[in-house]
Amino acid sequence: MVRKRIKTFNFHYSEMHEFGIARKLLGDALAEAEKNRAEKIKEIAIELGEIADVTAEELKEAFGVVAEGTIAGKAKITVEMEKPKIKCLKGHESEWNREKEFSDGLFLDCPVCGEKAMLSGGNGRKVKKVVFG
Ligand SMILES: [Zn+2]
């Protein structure tokens, strides 16, 4: 139930298939290579939220497919998991306690001050590092 509600935070959900995600990340990595005039990508480090709508395994597999034939075709893909965090209206950041229910379908209570808090991370996926050569 909670998992489903979280998707309201993700405005691009409709196109979020693992291949779409992999293609986007590959595009970012290739752009980085172009900027650096690199001819080959050796490694790509990806940061993936623990509650993102794709698993590390699915993403790695999809990446292997979409990267084939590109300069990232033989790149080693490493995935670093990001913990979900929440941030309240007063700016306190905490780890998300998944036992807690959302009130109003959107808000959580800040464990520090009790103010309304929203999810502020843990569902993203991005390229953290590209190693060339
Ligand atoms: Zn707070």
Image: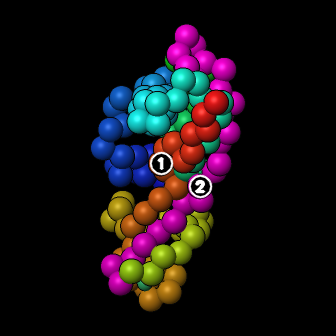
Give the x, y percent position of residue 79.
Answer: 65, 42
Q: Quadrant of residue 95?
A: bottom right
What's the residue at 68%, 39% (across, down)? 78
Q: Residue at the top extreme?
A: 69
- Residue 115 seen anywhere in this rendered image of the structure: yes
Q: Is residue 84 magenta?
A: yes
What's the residue at 52%, 55% (across, down)? 122
What label does residue 124 carry, if any? 1
- Label 1 near ligand 1 (CB < 8 Å): no
User: Secondary structure under badge 2?
Assistant: strand
Residue labelled with disc 2: 82
Q: CA distance from mark 2 to mark 1?
A: 8 Å
Label 1 neighbour load within 10 Å: few <14, some 14-19, many 20+: some
Q: Is residue 33 above or below residue 52?
A: above
Q: Is residue 73 above or below residue 128?
A: above
Q: Nearer the viewer, residue 37 or 79?
A: 37
Q: Are marks 2 and 1 in contact (CB under 8 Å)?
A: yes
Q: Nearer the viewer, residue 119 or 28?
A: 28
Amino acid type at mark 2: Glu
